[in-house]
Structure formats: C-alpha cells, structure tokens
Amino acid sequence: MKLIMKNTEISSQIPQLTDFQKKRLYREILDFIQFNTFVQSVHFTICPVCEVNERLIIKKGFLNGKKRYQCKECDYKFVSTRRKLS
Ligand SMILES: [Zn+2]
C-alpha cells in the first residue's frame, strides 16, 4: 500500500501514534537536531547533505566572500562559515 500524505496531514496524525512510535519519531528528530548543531559548530568542511568527509569536498571559489565548496559525492554546493552551512 502506498500512502501519500501532505506534511500537514502527517503532523495532524502524530497524536494518533502509539507512545512507542512517538518515542522513535522523537529520537529521529533529536538526531537531526544534534546533527545540525554539530554541523553549525564545526569549521571544517563536511557535506550537509550526504555527510561525506572533507576528502570528497572540493573548493569552488567564493560566494559573497565566503569559501564555496562542492561535494563530489552528491554535487551539492555549499558555503562554509563558522555558524552554518548553506
Ligand atoms: Zn554530499
């Protein structure tokens, strides 16, 4: 069965989940939050999409005065600053 729901519909269903399911969901969300916090706190380059290490990151010049990088794994381009990757 393939079930397609909009994000808002999914959100409205969350209260219907069992405690166990909610726990798993919250753990997953917590992982994302921790990952984002980690990415924001480090200065070395790591792909924010596929998380490959810096050996697969190539320099791609500058964007708005910030160093620009490209991931060789997924082709995602991003700039690295001390605060965030975008
Ligand atoms: Zn990547």
Image (spheres, grey):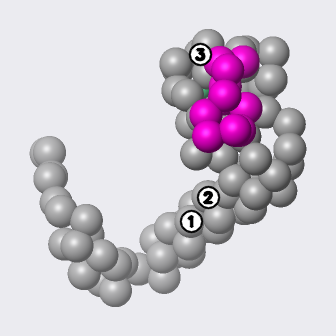
Question: What residue is shown at x 56% (from left), y 65% (from top)?
Answer: 29
Give the residues in magenta: 59-69
Mark 3 vs 1: CB contact within 8 A: no
Q: Which residue is mark 2?
A: 32
Whole-percent x and y of residue 59?
72, 18
Which one is earlier in the sequence, the residue at label 3 or at label 1?
A: 1
User: Looking at numbered disc 3 in the image, what kind of residue is underneath it?
Assistant: Glu
User: Looking at numbered disc 1 in the image, what kind of residue is underneath it?
Assistant: Ile
Whole-percent x and y of residue 8?
22, 73
Kindly tell me whether mark 3's CB lies below 8 Å from ligand 1. yes
Disc 2 is placed on an element classified as helix
- In the rendered view of the protein, which quadrant contains the N terminus? top left
Whole-percent x and y of residue 15?
34, 86
Mark 1 vs 2: CB contact within 8 A: yes
Q: Spot the residue most to the front.
A: 65
Q: Which residue is mark 3?
A: 73
Question: What residue is shown at x 81% (from left), y 52% (from top)?
Answer: 82
